[in-house]
Image (cartoon, rainbow, N blue to C red):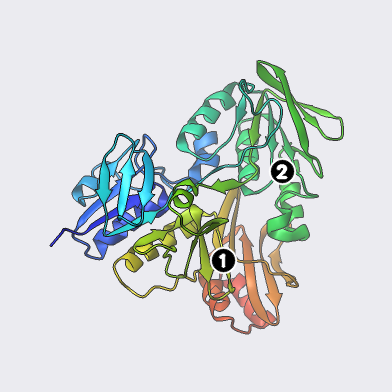
């Protein structure tokens, strides 16, 4: 009988956690982890934070030490380029001609930083000093140039853009944050909580330009300014474009898999082809609780989906329905966000907003749909089961959650 062989395509959080979970759960067959990067699997979380500004962080960079993969008989191959996946023949093809037969395979190819079609950022000779941030290599290049830069412009005021802004400001740079919307993080947090973050950046000397769009990057060889659609020019020695990510679905599309905003899977993380699964930033997963496919581009999702897909590949009955979670560490302010802000939800805030030690609850029909704790810890443990179960809660319950939280 042929030896079982699981092939994991993608050496990010989902692939690495799937590999570790497979061994933890007793899988004794061959296990290959293919990464197209030069470094062993690492955590993306620190890249926009302490990796840039050099301060204290909450997450180590690498997921495991160098000996972990050898000790657990995980064949980790770095700089391994996959040319195609053949679901009809259960084969992964590598550049160079090698073929890997699989009994099950995972596509955890992640996502790439979204590019803007701006003059100066694209074309045969893009300007120097223009950066994106998704990989360790991109972070290393940004960190190197950031030290010498004086004027930094960050295009994009989502979570990543705000964290890069905070890191640059912590290094004493003159930073301008360009927000397409009226406030940074408005689409994720709503007006009231987004205002908290705008004020936080303003307090640290950041120029927040709202309701603006970049039209062109200007410079001769190297960027020296960002032309806005309203005609203004923002001076810059360095520009970071942080406008979201695009799922890397090329292999899945070429293999004939169902693809939408990511590789489409069921709640067990199985794709439209037998024995082929997807997880992490590239996966558009069916969530029974919300009744739709969702692609969640956060570290917690990649980690938990990696563990869940390992169980699914081993034949366990899996229904992935985790409550969304992310956190952000900007300046000296800690924030965690649990759940999803749904249309029609009412915002209820308890705690000390001036000291930035509070919890914001989004409520609908007496249920918590989301909670954001700032300057406090322990809240996700309290609210996650309530959100998952759809339990009715009173204002007294909300106040108790805040009272039981501990300072960050």
Q: Residue 201, labelled with which disc?
A: 2
Secondary structure beneath label 2: helix
| 30 left or right, relative to 137 | left
Residue 7 versus residue 404 in the image, above or below: above
Q: Is residue 49 visible?
A: no
Question: Looking at the picture, how far across and down is residue 408, in whole percent?
Answer: 55, 57
Task: Provide residue 367's location: percent of width, then percent of height.
Answer: 65, 79
Up/down of 261 relative to 98, above or below: below
Residue 179: x percent and y percent?
75, 43
Q: Which class describes the residues within 10 Å of circle 1: few (<14), some (14-19), or many (20+)?
A: some
Q: Residue furthest right?
A: 230
Q: Earlier in the sequence, mark 2 or mark 1?
A: 2
From this viewpoint, which residue is outermost toward the top?
Answer: 220
Q: Residue furthest left?
A: 1
In the figure, 222 relative to 248: above or below?
above
Q: CA distance from mark 2 to mark 1?
A: 34 Å
Q: Nearer the viewer, residue 202 or 135?
A: 135
Placement of 373 over or under 390, stated as above or below:
above
Q: Residue at x 38, y 45 (%)?
A: 84
Please tell me in which quadrant of the rendered image residue 392 appears. bottom right
Res 252 visible: yes
Question: Residue 245: where, in percent of width, then height?
Answer: 58, 46
Q: Which residue is mark 1?
A: 293
Residue at x 44% of width, y 73% of height: 319
167 horizontally vs 91: left or right:
right
């Amino acid at each position: 009988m042929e030896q079982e062989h699981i092939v994991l395509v993608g050496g990010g959080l989902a692939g690495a956690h799937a590999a570790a979970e497979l061994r933890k759960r007793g899988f004794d067959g061959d296990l290959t982890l293919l990464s197209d990067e030069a470094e062993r699997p690492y955590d993306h979380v620190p890249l926009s934070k302490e990796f840039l500004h050099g301060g204290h962080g909450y997450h180590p960079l690498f997921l495991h030490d160098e000996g972990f993969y050898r000790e657990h008989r995980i064949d980790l191959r770095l700089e391994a380029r996959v040319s195609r996946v053949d679901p009809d023949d259960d084969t992964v093809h590598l550049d160079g001609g090698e073929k890997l037969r699989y009994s099950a395979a995972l596509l955890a190819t992640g996502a790439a930083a979204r590019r803007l079609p701006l003059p100066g950022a694209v074309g045969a000779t893009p300007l120097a000093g223009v950066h994106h941030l998704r990989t360790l290599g991109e972070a290393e290049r940004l960190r190197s140039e950031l030290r010498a830069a004086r004027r930094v412009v960050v295009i994009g005021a989502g979570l990543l853009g705000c964290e890069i802004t905070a890191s640059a400001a912590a290094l004493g740079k003159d930073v301008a944050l360009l927000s397409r919307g009226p406030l940074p993080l408005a689409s994720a947090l709503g007006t009231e909580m987004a205002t908290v973050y705008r004020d936080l950046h303003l307090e640290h000397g950041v120029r927040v330009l709202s309701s603006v769009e970049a039209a062109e990057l200007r410079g001769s060889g190297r960027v020296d300014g960002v032309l806005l659609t309203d005609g203004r020019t923002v001076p810059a020695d360095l520009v970071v474009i942080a406008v979201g990510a695009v799922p890397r679905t090329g292999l899945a599309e070429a293999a004939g898999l169902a693809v939408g905003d990511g590789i489409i899977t069921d709640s067990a993380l199985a794709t439209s082809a037998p024995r082929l699964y997807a997880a992490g930033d590239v996966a558009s997963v069916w969530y029974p609780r919300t009744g739709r496919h969702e692609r969640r581009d956060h570290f917690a999702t990649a980690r938990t989906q990696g563990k869940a897909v390992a169980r699914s590949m081993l034949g366990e009955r899996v229904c992935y329905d985790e409550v969304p979670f992310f956190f952000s560490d900007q300046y000296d302010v800690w924030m965690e966000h649990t759940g999803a802000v749904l249309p029609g939800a009412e915002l209820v805030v308890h705690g000390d907003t001036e000291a930035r030690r509070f919890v914001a609850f989004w409520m609908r029909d007496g249920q918590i749909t989301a909670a954001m704790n700032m300057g406090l810890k322990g809240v996700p443990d309290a609210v996650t089961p309530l959100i998952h179960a759809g339990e009715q809660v009173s204002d007294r319950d909300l106040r108790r959650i805040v009272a039981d939280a501990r300072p960050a």
